[in-house]
C-alpha cells in the first residue's frame, strides 16, 4: 500500500468513527433536495460545512419539504455521509 493509500485509509477510518458517534443523535437539518433515484431526501445539518462535510440521506416522509428545516435522527453512518429519519 502506498503512502497516499495509507493516508486515505486512516482518514476514512477516523471519519467513520466520528460519524458513527453521531448515530442516535438528532440534528436540525436543512432539506435541500429529493433524489428520485435513491428515493431519499438529501439534507445538511446546520453544523455541517457545504464544501467539506458529507450529506444526510433521509428516508422519505410526506411531511418533509425542500428548503425547510426538520429534526432528523441519525440511524446509520459511513465514512462520508449520514443516514436518518424524521425525528
Image (cartoon, helix red, strand yellow):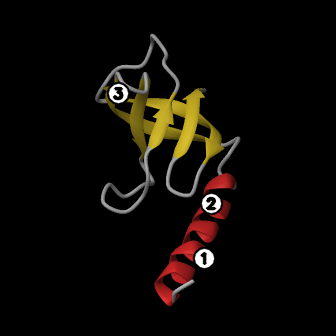
Residue 35's label in the rendered image is 3
Q: Residue at x 43, y 27 (%)?
A: 38
Q: CA distance from mark 2 to mark 1?
A: 10 Å
Q: Residue at x 43, y 46 (%)?
A: 55
User: Does residue 38 appear left or right of residue 26 in this picture?
Assistant: left
| Mark 1 burial class by Cα count in 10 Å: few <14, some 14-19, many 20+ | few
Q: Nearer the viewer, residue 61 or 1?
A: 1
Q: Residue at x 65, y 50 (%)?
A: 22
Residue 6 horizontal/vertical position (percent)? 57, 82
Please state, as top left, top right, bottom left or bottom right, where the C terminus lies in the image: top right
Q: CA distance from mark 2 to mark 3?
A: 24 Å
| Mark 2 burial class by Cα count in 10 Å: few <14, some 14-19, many 20+ | some
* Mark 3 in CB contact with mark 1 (< 8 angstroms): no
Disc number lying in front (2 or 1)? 1
Residue 86 horizontal/vertical position (percent)? 56, 25
* Mark 2 in CB contact with mark 3 (< 8 angstroms): no
Element assignment for label 2: helix
Asked if 16 appears above or below 14 in the picture, the reply is above
Residue 81 horizontal/vertical position (percent)? 50, 49
Mark closest to the chain's N terminus, 2 or 3: 2
Q: Residue at x 32, y 54 (%)?
A: 50
Asked if 58 appears above or below 6 in the picture, the reply is above
Mark closest to the chain's N terminus, 2 or 1: 1
Mark closest to the chain's N terminus, 3 or 1: 1
Residue 10's label in the rendered image is 1
Asked if 31 appears above or below 50 in the picture, the reply is above
| Mark 3 burial class by Cα count in 10 Å: few <14, some 14-19, many 20+ | few
Residue 16's label in the rendered image is 2
Amino acid at each position: 500500500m502506498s503512502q497516499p493509500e495509507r493516508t486515505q485509509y486512516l482518514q476514512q477510518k477516523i471519519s467513520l468513527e466520528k460519524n458513527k458517534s453521531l448515530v442516535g443523535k438528532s440534528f436540525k437539518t436543512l432539506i435541500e433536495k429529493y433524489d428520485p433515484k435513491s428515493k431519499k431526501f438529501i439534507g445538511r445539518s446546520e453544523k455541517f460545512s457545504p464544501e467539506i462535510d458529507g450529506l444526510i440521506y433521509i428516508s422519505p416522509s410526506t411531511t418533509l419539504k425542500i428548503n425547510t428545516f426538520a429534526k432528523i435522527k441519525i440511524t446509520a453512518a459511513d465514512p462520508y455521509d449520514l443516514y436518518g429519519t424524521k425525528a
